[in-house]
Amino acid sequence: MNKLVPFEWITALRFLKEGRMQTIFIVVAVAIGVAVIVFMSALLASLQANFLKRVLTSQPHIQLIPPDEVARVLRKPQEGEVAVAIVQRPVQRIRSIDQWQKVRSELTRWSEITNVSPSMSGSALGVRGAASRSIVVTGIDPNVYFNVVRIPDYLVAGQVRVLTDDILVGTELAKDLGVNVGEKIIVSSATGASRVLTVSGIFDLGNKSANQRSTFVALRTAQALFGLVGGVTSIDLTVTDPYEAETIAQRVQAVTGVEADSWIKTNAQFFTAVSAQQTSNTLIRVFVGLSVAFGIASVLVVSVIQRSKDIGILRAMGTSKEQILRVLLIQGGLLGFLGSLFGAVIGGGGLFFWHGYMRQADGSELFPLVLEPSLFAVAVLLAAVTGVAAAAVPALRAARLDPVVAIRG
Amino acid sequence: MAETNEVLRLEKVSKRYNVGTPVEVEVLHDIDLSVQRGEFVAVIGPSGSGKSTLLNIIGLLDRPTRGKLYVEGHETSRLGDDAITRLRGHSIGFVFQYHYLISAFTALENVMMPLLAERGFPNDTMRARAHTLLDQLGLARWENNLANNMSGGQQQRVAIARALAMNPAIILADEPTGNLDTKSADQVFEMMREVNRRNGTTFLLVTHNLDIAQRCDRVVEVIDGRVREGKVAA
Ligand SMILES: Nc1ncnc2c1ncn2[C@@H]1O[C@H](COP(=O)(O)OP(=O)(O)OP(=O)(O)O)[C@@H](O)[C@H]1O
Ligand SMILES: [Mg+2]
C-alpha cells in the first residue's frame, strides 16, 4: 500500500484487480467504443483540415467585386396606370471597382487583413496554331497575389515569373494547346485586343476545370487586354482568422460600399456537409458513450451484488457510506479511464495503419493526418467522467447496503 | 450512572421486524442488560431466539425499535448515521461466524483496514500495529498471504486481530468458532480469552458450545427474545 494513495483508491484498485475477468472485458468494451470515436473524429478532422487548407490557399478569404449592373425602368407610370415592367437582365460587362486605390489603401490599414491584392480578370481565347480554348485571364500583382493564392505551391514546370509578356497556365490547358514552358500562345479578348504571351510556368491546382481554364498574367497586361487601363475587377483579401472572414467581409462592405464575399459564403455547401458530418459524428459519440456507460454500470451492479459481504464488513469496521460511495465511483472512473487509454491508442494506431495502407492511385498519401493531442485528452477525460457518472447508481446501491443483511448472507 | 465501569447498557430494548406489515414480529422483548468493562460474556440460547439480533443492535449495525442503548456511556438513539459509524469504528470490533476477511487483501492489510478507513491514508504505524497484532496471535508468518490462502482457524484469528485493530472496548463475536473443528475452535477461544485478560477488552461471545460457555465469566441466555442470567447447567 502506497502511503500517498488513500483508502478509497486502494480499495477500488484491489477490487478491480480481483475481479480480473470482469475488469478486462469491460475495459476492452470501453476501449472499442473509444477507439471508434477517436478513429472517426481524427479522420474527420484530418479530412476537414486538409480540405480547408486547400481551399484557403487556392482562393481568397474575401473577394471584393463590382456590383451587378441592373437595368433601370425609365418610364414612369402615369396617373391611374399600373405598369408591369418586364426587365431584362443586362449584359454584364467587365467593369472596374470604383476608386479601387482608395479602397485598397483603406483596407491595408486594417490589422485583421493581411493581404490586399487587386486583380483584373475576364474571359479570352487562348490560341496556338489550330487549337483554341476559352480561358479566364487573371491579371495580378504577383508580389501580393501569391500570398493569397499560392500558385508557387502548385507549380509543376517552369517558374512563377509574371512579367509583361508572361503567362502561367494550367496543366490541362498546356496539354490542350500543346504548349511547353518557353513557348508562346496568342490571347485575344472579346474587345478584340490580343497579345502574344510566353508560357513561363505550368501549375496544377488539383482540379481539372481550373487547370483547363485558369491563366495568370501581369495586371497591366490584363488591363490592356480588356481595355480597362488602371482598373481592377476584384480585390482579393486574406485575413488573420479565416473563420472570421464573413464578419470581416460584412464590415468591409459597410465601410467601402463594395460587395465583399467571404470564402465561408462561397463555400456554403462545404459547411453544410461539415455540419451534417458533425451531427452524425455527435450522434455516434452519444450512442457509443451511452453504451459504454451502461456497460460500466452493469458490471458494477453485478460486482456490488458479488461484493455485498465485503461491503458489509467494511461498513461494520467503521467505513462510512460516503467512503463506500467513493470506492464505487472511483471504480467506474478507472474503468472509463483505462478503457479509453487503450481505446485512444487503438484508435490512433488504427488510423495510422489505415492511413499508411490506403494510398491514392499514384501511391501518394490520401491526405496528411491531423492528430490533435487534445482529441485524445478529451476522449480519455470524457470516458473517465462517463465512468464516474455510470457508477452513480451502483455506488448508491452499495452505500445503502444494510450491513446486517450483507453479513447474514 | 453510578458505575463508571459499565461499557454497555440496554434499557427495555425491543426489536420488531417488518413493522407495519402483516408479518410484523417482535423478536426481542424489553431487554435489560448491563456489561462491565473487561467482562467475558457468553451468549447462549436456541436457534432463532434472537442472539444475532441482540448482537447486531449492541454492535450498532441495527437499531432497536424501542428502548435505550448506551455504548461506553453514549446514548445512541439520537445519533445520526455518521456518528453511529464513528462510534462503531472506535468502540466495537466484530468477529463473525464466516470469517469474512476481504479476499482482495492480504492478512496484514485486512487487519489494517479499520485503521485505514478511519485515517484515510496508510502509514507505518498502522502497518506496525497490524503486524504486532498478528504476531501476538501467532500469525506473523502468514501476514502476506491473501485471505483465501489460509485455513479457517487462521482466517478467524486474523479476524480477531482485525477486530482488535482499533483497540475497541467491546468485541462482539457471533459464533466465531461455529465453523471450526474442535481443536481450532479451542485455539480461537483461548486467543480471545488471552486478549481479554491482557487488554481488558470486553467480549460478548455467541456460542452453541456449552463447554466454551462454561469457561466464560458470565453466561447470558436468550430464550424467545428475553434474556436470563445464569450459570450453565454442568
Ligand atoms: N430481517 C429479519 N426480518 C424478519 N425476521 C427476522 C429478521 N432477522 C431475524 N429475524 C427473525 O428473528 C428471530 C431471531 O433471529 P436471530 O438471527 O437473532 O436468531 P439467533 O438466535 O441468532 O439464531 P441462530 O442461533 O440460528 O443464529 C428469528 O425468528 C428470525 O427469523
Ligand atoms: Mg445467529
Image (tube, coloured by chain):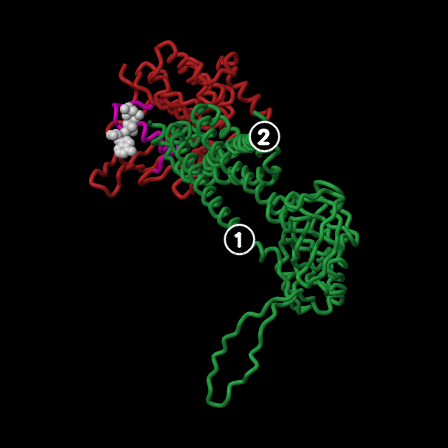
Chain colours: A green, B red
- Inspect the image, locate mark 2, and give the three-letter code of the amino acid beneath it: Gly
Q: Which of A224/A313 is in front? A: A224
Residue indicated by mark 2: A356
Residue in the picture at 73% in, 63% down: A107
Label 1 amino acid? Gln
- The one nearer the camera, A359 or A19, is A359
On the image, the x and y values in percent for residue A28 come to 47, 29
* Quadrant of the snapshot with the N terminus of chain A: top right
Mark 2 secondary-structure assignment: helix
Q: Which residue is mark 1?
A: A269
**Splitting the image into four quadrants, where does ligand 2 fall?**
top left
Query: As drawn, which residue projects farthest toward the right?
Result: A163
Q: Chain of mark 2?
A: A
Q: CA distance from mark 2 to mark 1?
A: 30 Å
Q: Secondary structure at mark 1?
A: helix
Q: Are marks 2 and 1 in contact (CB under 8 Å)?
A: no
A257 to the left or right of B48: right
* Magenta stretch, residue numbers: B42-63
